[in-house]
Image (cartoon, rainbow, N blue to C red):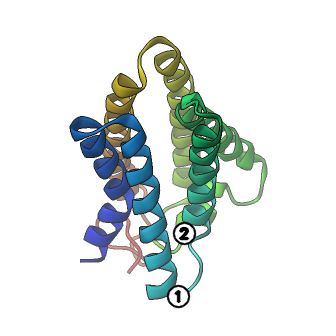
Amino acid sequence: MKWFRSLVEEVGPVTVFGLANFFYTFEVAVIAMVSTLLFITATTIFTRRGWPWFAIISTAGLVLFAGLSFWFDDFSFFTASDTILDGILGITILWSLRWDKPLVQRLFERTFAITNEAWCILTWRWGILFIVLALLNEVVRTNVSNEVWAYFKVGATIFILLFGCYQFFLSMKMRLPKESNRFGLRI
């Protein structure tokens, strides 16, 4: 059931955003997404040990861009948030290859037991993915309405999830057998 909770944490805010955009307005969708994200992040902090730093930082970034959008009555701040945050994340992930442990490994080594080579491959894949998503977001957000961009946002999130699932093929192939199950998940 742990995986289901993680799925809800990842997909919940974007699902609420997509539904609110479909049934109401883009502005209502932004409020619904930010509210859902704040609720999930707070719930995670109070029900788990430790602070989910990645969730806290991404929530703070989204709240900042949503706040700017409402303050200036210009939702291009909100749509640009994916360009900026995905771009920074992609560059940071790739830059982390210079460190002793890549960022992807630091974030997920308690979950996956895979070889160092696998961590480097995953770092490259995720870094490039986020840079490509940042570039695509910029193209889409500057050429379509906010309402249409919302569908792109939902689609991009689904793609990220599918991409993440695809990475299990690598973790299965390059797992540490004594420390993981057949999917490379740490025992």
Q: Amino acid at mark 2?
A: Glu
Tell how many labels.
2
Task: Check disc 1 and report its element: helix, strand or loop.
Answer: loop
Image location (x, y in percent) of residue 170: 39, 49
Given residues 124 and 67, the one toward you in this image is 67
Q: Amino acid at mark 1?
A: Arg
Q: Work out whether residue 6 can be spotted.
A: yes
Using the image, determine if residue 4 lies above or below residue 43.
Answer: above
Given residues 5 and 24, the one toward you in this image is 24
Q: Residue at x 30, y 76 (%)?
A: 2
Separation of disc 1 and disc 2 at Cα? Answer: 17 Å
Q: Residue at x 31, y 30 (%)?
A: 151
Sequence-wise, the earlier of marks 1 and 2 is 1
Residue 61 horizontal side relative to residue 171, left or right: right
Q: Quadrant of residue 135?
A: top right
Image location (x, y in percent) of residue 34: 47, 55
Q: Work out whether residue 112 can be spotted.
A: no
Q: Residue at x 24, y 44 (%)?
A: 19
Instruction: Tell me the residue that label 1 is attached to.
Output: 49
- The local crowd at label 2, few if under 14, some if 14 to 19, many if 20 or more residues have their Cα within 10 Å, is some
Label 1 vs label 2, nearer the camera:
1
Task: Check disc 2 and report its element: helix, strand or loop.
Answer: loop
Instruction: Tell me the residue that label 2 is attached to.
Output: 109
Q: Quadrant of residue 124?
A: top right
Residue 92 horizontal side relative to residue 25, left or right: right
Image location (x, y in percent) of residue 81: 59, 38
- The local crowd at label 1, few if under 14, some if 14 to 19, many if 20 or more residues have their Cα within 10 Å, is few
Q: Quadrant of the N terminus?
A: bottom left
Given residues 159 and 124, the one toward you in this image is 159
